[in-house]
Image (cartoon, rainbow, N blue to C red):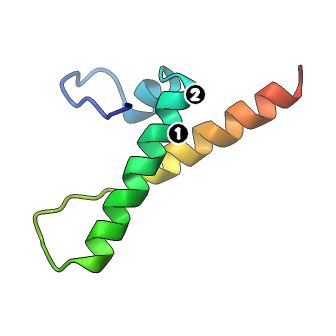
């Protein structure tokens, strides 16, 4: 399962996402969707969700889809 590892300050979210296998990237995207739903359905303030994750993941998925179509 993919996850954002914040232990390395030198490696950006974009770089980490690029290093995920396709299946891990899809798992990570699904997790962000589940977090967004949880946040929408709950008034808990301790559930952290960063929409930046979703943007970066979708951008990488689009890139990979376009790149695979060229070969």
Residue 60 in view here:
yes
Residue toward you, 32 or 54: 32
Residue at mark 2 to residue at mark 1: CA–CA distance: 6 Å
Residue 27's x, y, as percent? 45, 39
Q: Dot 1: what SS? A: helix
Image: 58 above or below 24: below
Residue 1's x, y, as percent? 37, 31
Q: Dot 2: what SS? A: helix
Residue 51 in view here:
no
Q: For residue 36, which quarter of the picture?
A: bottom left
Image: 59 above or below 11: below
Residue 57's x, y, as percent? 51, 43
The residue that appears at 12% across and 71% down in the rendered structure is: 45
* Relative side of 60 to 44, left or right: right
Q: For residue 43, which quarter of the picture?
A: bottom left
* Relative side of 13 to 38, left or right: right
CB under 8 Å between callouts 2 and 1?
A: yes
Q: Quadrant of the C terminus?
A: top right
Image: 18 above or below 50: above
* Relative side of 24 to 3, left or right: right
Dot 1: few (<14), some (14–19), or many (≥20) neighbours within 10 Å? some
Residue toward you, 55 or 2: 2
The residue that appears at 54% across and 29% down in the rendered structure is: 23
The residue that appears at 60% across and 44% down in the rendered structure is: 59
Q: Mark 2 sits on what residue?
A: 22
Q: Mark 1 sits on what residue?
A: 26
Residue 34's x, y, as percent? 37, 59
Dot 2: few (<14), some (14–19), or many (≥20) neighbours within 10 Å? some
Q: Which disc number belongs to residue 57?
A: none
């Amino acid at each position: 399962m993919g996850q954002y590892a914040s232990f390395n300050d030198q490696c950006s979210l974009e770089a980490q996402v690029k290093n995920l296998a396709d299946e891990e990237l899809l798992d990570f995207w699904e997790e962000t969707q589940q977090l967004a739903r949880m946040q929408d359905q709950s008034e808990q303030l301790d559930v952290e969700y960063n929409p930046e994750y979703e943007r970066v993941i979708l951008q990488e998925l689009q890139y990979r889809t376009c790149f695979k179509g060229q070969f």
